[in-house]
Amino acid sequence: MNETLQLTLHWSDWLALFMHFLSLSLLSIGGAITTAPDMHRYLVEQQHWLTDTQFNASIAIAQAAPGPNVLFIALMGWNVGVNAGGMPAGSMAMLIAMTGILLPSTTLTYLAARWGHRNRELRAVRAFKQGMAPIVVALLIATGWIMASAHSNPATDWPLWLLTVAAALIIWRTKIHLLWLLAAGAVLGWYGLV
C-alpha cells in the first residue's frame, strides 16, 4: 500500500529540513545510517512529513540498490517533497536533504586531508597515520571474516579459506597488482574451483 501525505511546507520548513540534516551529518560517525533513529524521530514522529511506511521503504530500497548507502537520504527527501507538492518539490527536497547530509562531512574531510597533506612531515601527523594503518587493516580483516563466516564453514570450505590466506599473503609480500588476483579469482570461479 502506497501511503502519501498532503503537506504544505513553507520556506522555513525547507530550511529546518536542511539544518536538521546538516547537524546529523556531523553526528554520522559510521555513516549516515547511524542517524536513522533521529531521522525517524524528526521526519515521522515530530514533523509528520513521512509515514512509517515511507521511512522504512526509503531505507530498504536504498540498501537493496547498488551504490552508496547514503541514497536513503535522497529517497527520504524525495518522499517529503512529493508529499509537499509532487515531482518538482520532490527533486528540491532530495537536493536539500543530500546537500545537508553531505556538505559538513565532505568539507571537514577535505579540509582535514589538505591539512594532513600540508603537514605530513609533522611527527604527530606521521604518528596518526602510522597508528591508523593497523586499525584500518584490522577493521577490513574483521569485515572480511564476518562476511566470509556468514557464507561458509572453514571446516568444510578449507580450499576457499586457503586461497583467501594465499591471496592475502601475495598482496602483502609482493608487488603483484590486486586486479591480477581478482582476475585469477574470477577464472577459478568460472571453472567452479572456488
Image: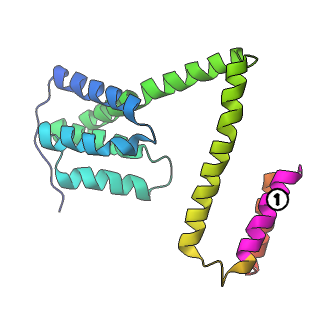
Q: Main secondary structure of the magenta part?
A: helix
Residue 112, relative to residue 174: is it above or below? above
Which residue does the image show at 13% across and 43% down from the upper left?
45
Horizontally, residue 72 falls left or right of residue 186, namely: left
Report x, y in % for residue 131. Answer: 67, 35
Residue 37, relative to residue 179: is it above or below? above
- Which contiguous range is marked in magenta? 160-176
The quarter of the picture where the N terminus appears is bottom left
Question: Residue 39 lies in what quarter of the image?
Answer: top left
Residue 147 visible, this orientation: yes
Q: Nearer the viewer, residue 33 or 100?
A: 33
Whether 173 is among the magenta residues is yes
Report x, y in % for residue 115. Answer: 63, 16
To which residue does mark 1 refer? 169
User: Identity of the amino acid at label 1?
Assistant: Leu
Q: Nearer the viewer, residue 106 or 7?
A: 106
Which residue does the image show at 36% across and 56% down from the upper left?
61
Report x, y in % for residue 175. Answer: 89, 49
Which residue does the image show at 33% across and 41% down from the upper left?
35
